[in-house]
Image (cartoon, rainbow, N blue to C red):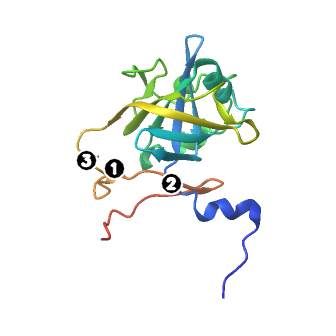
């Protein structure tokens, strides 16, 4: 017997991929926000949903670039904090002890404490594919990961390589460290 899931929570059946920190640089100021709705579209393209009411969305529209930073489980509290205040009012890098590091191909900074990074440039028009859904499409122009943690996939046997996965609200999961083949 299957249980019915309310449609406003149905996305949680599939949306438990890694939560990320999206960083931007607008008017010389770095910013970072938490995002759980990010997905690969192809080997060099990603889609990301960020509310148009969010300061980060305005930064992306203005600069047409951003970095998807992949935190590990040790950053869970910081990820929650970054998602709880607006970058228009708070310098989140400073407030939450994050280190902005230069990216290779975009002006937006990498979050130094994260274990992986996708440097992205927005594809098409004004930046938003679907204004109603606040969906951005971007081309990945550079990628990097902490040495020893990623080969062709995350080595989740190493605790430091265990990514953080959003299950809804303030609940997260991490890979168990076992590989199932």
On the question of residue 76 being in view, the answer is no
On the question of residue 43 being in view, the answer is yes
Residue on which disc 3 sits: 151
Residue at the spot 42% in from the left edge and 34% down from the top edge: 118
**Separation of marks 2 and 1 at Cα, in angstroms:** 14 Å
Give the vertical position of 116 relative to 111 (above or below).
below
**Separation of marks 1 and 3 at Cα, in angstroms:** 11 Å
Say whether disc 2 or disc 1 marks the residue closer to the N-terminus. Answer: 2
Give the vertical position of 4 relative to 143 (above or below).
below
Residue on which disc 2 sits: 17
Residue at the spot 66% in from the left edge and 54% down from the top edge: 169
Q: Nearer the viewer, mark 1 or mark 3?
A: 3
Q: Position of residue 162 (x, y in %)?
A: 38, 53
Q: How many marks?
A: 3
Residue at the outermost top position: 28
Q: Position of residue 15 (x, y in %)?
A: 58, 57
- Badge 2 element: loop
- Badge 3 element: loop
The quadrant in which the N terminus is found is bottom right
Write down the quadrant of residue 155 in the picture.
Answer: bottom left
Question: Left or right: 34 with respect to 143?
Answer: right
**Separation of marks 2 and 3 at Cα, in angstroms:** 19 Å
Q: Position of residue 75 (x, y in %)?
A: 46, 43
Residue at the spot 68% in from the left edge and 29% down from the top edge: 86
**Front residue of this view, candidates 174 and 58:** 58
Write down the quadrant of residue 35 in the picture.
Answer: top right
Instruction: Kindly indicate whether the residue at mark 3 contacts the one at mark 2 (C-beta within 8 angstroms).
Output: no
Say whether disc 1 or disc 3 marks the residue closer to the N-terminus. Answer: 3
Give the vertical position of 2 relative to 74 (above or below).
below
Residue on which disc 1 sits: 161
Question: Left or right: 1 with respect to 94?
Answer: right
């Amino acid at each position: 017997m299957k249980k019915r899931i309310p449609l406003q929570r149905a996305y949680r059946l599939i949306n438990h991929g890694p939560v990320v920190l999206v960083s931007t640089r607008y008017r010389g100021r770095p910013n970072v926000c938490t995002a759980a709705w990010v997905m690969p579209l192809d080997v060099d393209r990603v889609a990301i949903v960020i509310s148009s009411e969010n300061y980060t969305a305005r930064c992306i529209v203005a600069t047409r670039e951003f970095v998807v930073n992949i935190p590990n489980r040790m950053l869970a509290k910081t990820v929650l904090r970054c998602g709880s205040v607006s970058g228009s009012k708070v310098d989140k890098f400073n407030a939450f002890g994050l280190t902005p590091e230069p990216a290779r191909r975009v002006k937006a900074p990498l979050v130094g404490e994260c274990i992986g990074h996708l440097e992205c440039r927005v594809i098409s028009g004004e930046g938003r594919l679907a204004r109603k859904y606040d969906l951005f499409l971007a081309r990945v122009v550079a990628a990097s990961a902490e040495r020893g943690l990623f080969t062709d996939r995350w080595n989740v046997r190493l605790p430091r390589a265990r990514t953080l996965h959003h299950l809804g609200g303030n609940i997260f999961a991490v890979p168990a460290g076992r590989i199932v083949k």
